[in-house]
Amino acid sequence: MIDVVFSDSFAMTLKHYYKQRKVDRKVLSMPMYLSIGDISQCSFVESRKTVYKIQYAHTRESEQNTSEAVSHLKRMLRALNDGLDQGESIRIWWSGNADDYCGFLWLCDYLFDYDVETTAIHVPMAFATLGNELLTISGLGEISAPGIDELQLFTYESKLLKSQRNAYRYYWQQLRGENNPIRTIINGLAVSQSIDFYDRFIIANLSQHRYRNILRVIGETLGNYPFVPSWWYRHRIDYLVSMGSIAFKPDEQEIMDLSVGKIKLNV
């Protein structure tokens, strides 16, 4: 069986979980961020490369990191194809996180020509703990290896019939046809949105009266609205600065050769 996940961090957690239990299992990590960017599939890898460029734009080795991410995606696609050609069964891990959700839909579409046994583990975003407290997560990456058993994640596994996969496939084709820049989860469904959909959450943490450190703004925005990765909020801040909606002031001193800067709303 092949486990497919759409989060690098959860893939590492799952591999560690299996290693501790001496379980020989393939885990494919496919962080494609399909809730963002072009999904028309005219050139699937190239469209993901564009997203990776945004992800690593503010890292020192941005070009190298982007290249490595593309190479990793290609390796995962080859491994998936090899497994499918050999008739291996597939287990898909997904959640209400937009990238997980869209990854799940994409994979249901991808499996259309394959008659393989498929199961899915749809992980909820909230759990009732033994202490009668509510535990909420924003993505699978927040779950630890012990948490897999503590939260009884394998009890959520269910068969995914080909008819069900086809239904999800049609859903993905609809989103592909719309091909909006953003897909977000509203009332449990993936909904196409405009590219500025998340900008309101950044602006909610700014004022016209004082400059605030960009990293602090992103941290607070992510804490209150953990719907997209931090690098997407940074990308949109860059755009809003370029359009004059947000004023930018560079740091007086650079931190580790990287200038972060401060921002506020323009009057």
Image (tube, grey):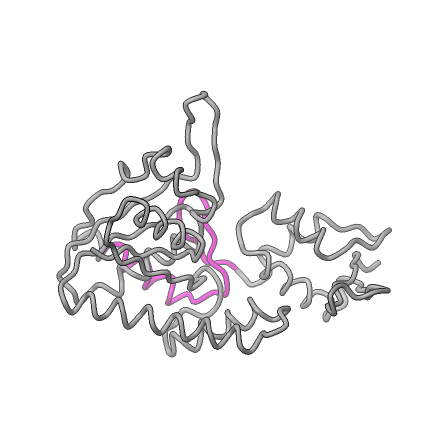
Q: Is residue 164 left or right of residue 239?
A: left
Magenta stretch containing residue 178, yes or no? yes
Total number of numbered labels? Answer: 0
Residue drawn 36% across the image and 58% down it: 103
Image: 151 above or below 141:
above
**Quadrant in the rendering for residue 121:** top left
Image: 198 above or below 240:
above
Residue drawn 26% across the image and 48% down it: 22
Residue drawn 50% across the image and 69% down it: 51
Q: Which image quarter holds the N terminus? A: bottom left
Q: Which sits in the foreground, 50 or 42?
A: 50
Magenta stretch containing residue 17, yes or no? no
Q: Measured from the top left, where is residue 237 in percent x and y?
A: 68, 62
Q: Is residue 139 left or right of residue 116?
A: right
Residue drawn 67% across the image and 68% down it: 239
Residue farthest top in this picture = 132
Q: Measured from the top left, where is residue 108 in percent x and y?
A: 26, 59
Q: Is residue 247 left or right of residue 163?
A: right
Q: Which sits in the foreground, 247 or 20?
A: 20
Q: Is residue 170 left or right of residue 34?
A: left
**Quadrant in the rendering for residue 84:** bottom left
Q: Which image quarter holds the C terminus? A: bottom right
Image: 188 above or below 129:
below
Q: Measured from the top left, where is residue 235 in percent x and y?
A: 63, 65
**Quadrant in the rendering for residue 30:** bottom left
Q: Measured from the top left, where is residue 74 in percent x and y?
A: 35, 74
Residue range (magenta): 167-193
